[in-house]
Image (tube, helix red, strand yellow):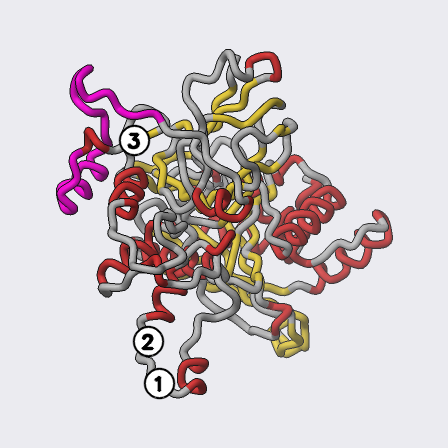
Amino acid sequence: MPTNIIMPALELAQESGKVVHWLKRPGDAVQKGEPIVEIETDKVTVEIEAPASGVLRDVTAREGDVVPVGQTIAVILAVGEVGAGASAPAVMPAANAAATGAVPTPPVAVNASAGAVKASPLARKIAEQHGVDLARVTTASGRIEKADVLAYVESQKAPSAGDGRAGRLVAASPKARRLAAERGLDISALRGSGPGGAVLTVDVSAAGRPAAAAPAAAQSVRPVGAPGVGTVWRIMAERMTTSWTTAPHFYLVREVNVSRLVSWLDKARKQTGAHITYTDLLVKLVAAALLQHPRVNASWKDGTILQNADINVGLAVAIDDGLVVPVIHRADTLRLAEIAARREDVVSRAQAGKLRPADIQGGGFTISNLGMYGVDAFSAIVNPPQAAILAVGRIADRVVALNGQPAVQPTMVLTLSCDHRALDGARGAQFLGALAELIEEPLALLV
């Protein structure tokens, strides 16, 4: 049987995902577990792996398309099913077709006489704006989508005399097409910097700059990094803006003595031989505190508090393009060496841009540690839809009261940021108090 490739739901609040880049073309052989497409969610860009081995067919989502969660974007046919089982020819992403020189499979014309033309509401709206008769639009799936209408509109433009690009459908992202139309630019005249020469948004923006501007001035406002870089940063900015403007934040601060934590780290490294860090210790202790106070391990969605069944601790990881939060799943069941190995694995893959969907799914609580940067204390923004995030400052020698006398002790400042919709002050304080006790006396884990 054909195996459907669907737009995955990587978190509770996700409603759609964007197809960034197809790593395989229609007709390519794929192996189960092999990355086949890059998907952009509201958290990060991830590679989706093939759920089965076979041949990729019926690709219905082009690069740049935003697809609802659960919708099929392609199918994988077993070797014996190819040819006999394909319900419709596959649509090759325009950028891939241009890059490989391949000729896409001829599309199937929609039979208008058989009944009403099947089209998405957005496709109908765009067709109406451009005066397009949907009966004239061809599609591979039998249902007209936005990209089909845009392709038809582009193909109907009169070619310029002597233009070597005449008659060729220009590969471009939907956003680039929309921006070019808004600025009155002929997208076929633009030089694309995307795969196979596809026109990207940055190309349209560059073409719209005044020609008289000095080169130095143009360089001073260029996008950060190469084309395509900045997606993660934009996602991070959108998520944090949403959290800051919709979640009523409050903060609880506590300074804890970490002299026993320091001793525990030394002993753990000697006993396990693993490269254990303070973050690993904190993951273990936070998981234990969440076990005692499960209400903190919750999420706010659609006006309801959802209790998380497992204790999955996310780690805020800084990468070149922004911030991602890979997850240590079921942290309460892992030994320190296992937490360290898992942390090292997901952090290295996050920095290499190779996170898998499972790496960012299911997080119920997040730790953000800036102590290694010399930060004493800070307040983090809650990672939606989670109820709280723990901000960790550096370990430093400070003068504290010890047995009624001033003494120099290593301490650390913890700041718990809470979403008041899911967590009140009393519950947050109880959790922070339990965590502080575990940090100051880690042997309590054995009790």
Looking at the image, is mark 2 or mark 3 earlier in the sequence?
3
Front disc: 2 or 3: 3
Residue at 43% across / 25% down in the picture?
89
Residue 391 spot, x, y in % from top left: 51, 61
Q: Based on the picture, tell me whether residue 120 belongs to the magenta stretch.
A: yes
Label pair 1/2, CB-CB below 8 angstroms: yes
Mark 2 = which residue? 209
Residue 17 spot, x, y in % from top left: 40, 41
Mark 1 = which residue? 213
Task: Name the foreground residue: 17 vs 167.
Answer: 167
Task: Name the foreground residue: 112 vs 433.
Answer: 112
Magenta range is: 108-133
Q: Which type of secondary structure does the marked residue at label 3 adopt?
A: strand
Residue 192 spot, x, y in % from top left: 44, 60
Residue 213, compared with residue 265, is above or below; it is: below
Q: Residues within 10 Å of mark 1 (few under 14, many from 20)?
A: few
Residue 109, compared with residue 67, is above or below; it is: above
Residue 36 spot, x, y in % from top left: 57, 36
Front disc: 3 or 1: 3
